[in-house]
Amino acid sequence: MGKGKKRGRSEPGSTIQPRNKYSDNPPDFASLASLYPSFKPFVFFSGGRARIDWTDYNATRELTRILLLHDHGVNWWIPDGQLCPTVPNRSNYINWINDLLSSEIIQSFGCGDETKVKGFDIGTGANCIYPLLGASLFRWTFVASDFTAVALEWAEKNVKSNLHISDLIEIRDSKVVPHFLEVENRESDKIILEEDDSKSSMGPAVLLGVVKENEMFDFCMSNPPFFETFEEAGLNPKTSCGGTPEEMVCNGGEQAFVTRIIEDSTVLRQRFRWYTSMLGKKATLKLLISKLWEVGVTVVKTTEFVQGQTSRWGIAWSFMPTARKIIAPPVAIKSVLSFMLEGIKRQYSALDVLQSVEEFFKCCGASCKLNSSTFSVDIVASNDQCNTISKNGTRDLDSVRSHGNDKQSLDGSSLQVPQDNLSFRILVFQQIPGSLLIKGSLQQKDSPLSGLFSVVFGSLEESMKSKFCR
């Protein structure tokens, strides 16, 4: 990613955290190699620059070890195969949370010592990176949870290897869940969660069952399993960060995992000031934002973390009352959205894209009318159809081309729009060769489903780019 892009963020948590010491000062491999002989064998020079082989797990692990020691005074190690975190990227997340806590967007708990910050790290892993950084940088206290024997053993070792912060971090086993768990929601109605077969199939507890009675936290954080399969997790040949199936994979991927955090947060509500998670896919971010407004949060904040060639996204939400009146409405509806299709494969034309847009919505049951003269498609979709679109946005549309005879052409009349349905128009514009601009415009801004427009349009963007771009 070139320099100068994606820098103008004003909300808490810019693309590269200004207080992250690596933001404008990446690690100097040559200098580190001269200071730490154990790192020297992994450093080589190419094009006049000191480099390491990012596909070498031992090199990336040793880099993480010496950065934590050199810059943070933290002793650290993990066994072979465990997920090896990059310190600059993790520092971005920690500093973003610090920005959220300092922003006064939401009210404080209003009791006790407000200078003492307590965090909860969901799935800390053997590396225990977030508690170690948070404790060393800000003197935050942490509860760090995990469920595998290796993760619990090595997280504990990493904490005990740092006596100056060891009293700030508690390692907690998330498998130790009572058979019956009783919690209270905001209205003080008691909810009983029984650990039956359906619950246990979801995996270890996330927050409910791990958070103890009467415990309160300033935030929780998570670097969730990004992938649905271990094969998918190994698709990037340019890096070797390790990672076990328990760390990298869960049923439904990151969307399902963070949805579980959201579901737990609807019960715990104001027991946490901020609920947060990192995400690996921008498309997931759009889907989760819509879900959060549905469950009644008071505020949602997002950011993008960029460090080197890696991009991640952060999402945060709260049920606390807002502390200031100048705040965006719960649903900021954009009536016009657009995206570019660049590097389109040569065999496809603008008409192919237009027809694929129509097929994308028709295969989910939405009503469509295509106008080839204006290169537009009018769409009307119900709430259920919008949900289907958001879930199946990247499905292969070739299977529905056989329904081409069912296409409707715009004959001067407009689609009938039932009350409470989402109505919008998609237009395709020719740009420079190999590029198209796809624009969507909301036709009924006062529809109860207007808030879903950005989610539906985001699913279309992901599908079209997957199908047509190189």
Image (spheres, grey):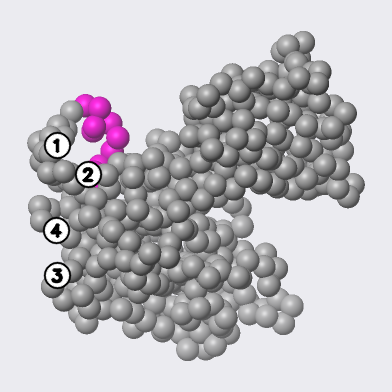
What number is the disc on residue 123? none
Q: Please, what is the dominant secondary structure of the magenta stretch?
A: loop
Q: Which residues are magenta?
A: 197-208
Q: Earlier in the sequence, mark 1 or mark 4?
A: 1
Q: Earlier in the sequence, mark 3 or mark 2?
A: 3
- Residue type marked 1: Ile
Q: CA distance from mark 3 to mark 4?
A: 13 Å
Which residue is denoted by mark 1 in the rendering?
A: 191
Q: In the rendered structure, which amino acid carries the disc numbered 4?
A: Glu
Which residue is found at the position 66% from the left and 46% from the top?
337
Is the N terminus in the top left, top right, bottom left or bottom right quadrant?
bottom right
* Rendering quarter of residue 341: top right
Q: Please state if 123 lies on the left or on the right of 309 as rendered.
A: left
Q: CA distance from mark 3 to mark 2?
A: 21 Å
Q: Is residue 290 left or right of residue 275?
A: right
Q: Which residue is mark 3?
A: 111
Task: Name the amino acid, label 3.
Answer: Cys
Magenta stretch encompasses residue 470: no
Q: Nearer the viewer, residue 225 or 236?
A: 225
> Do callouts 3 and 4 mark residues in contact (Cβ within 8 Å)?
no
Residue 12 at x, y percent in the picture: 45, 69
Q: Which residue is mark 4?
A: 215
Task: Please tell me whether mark 3 or mark 2 is closer to you in this view.
Answer: 3
Which of the 4 image quarters holds residue 299? bottom left
Q: Residues within 10 Å of mark 2 (few under 14, many from 20)?
A: some
Furthest residue toward right: 433
The reply to whether the C-beta atoms of the residues labelled 4 and 2 are less than 8 Å apart is: no
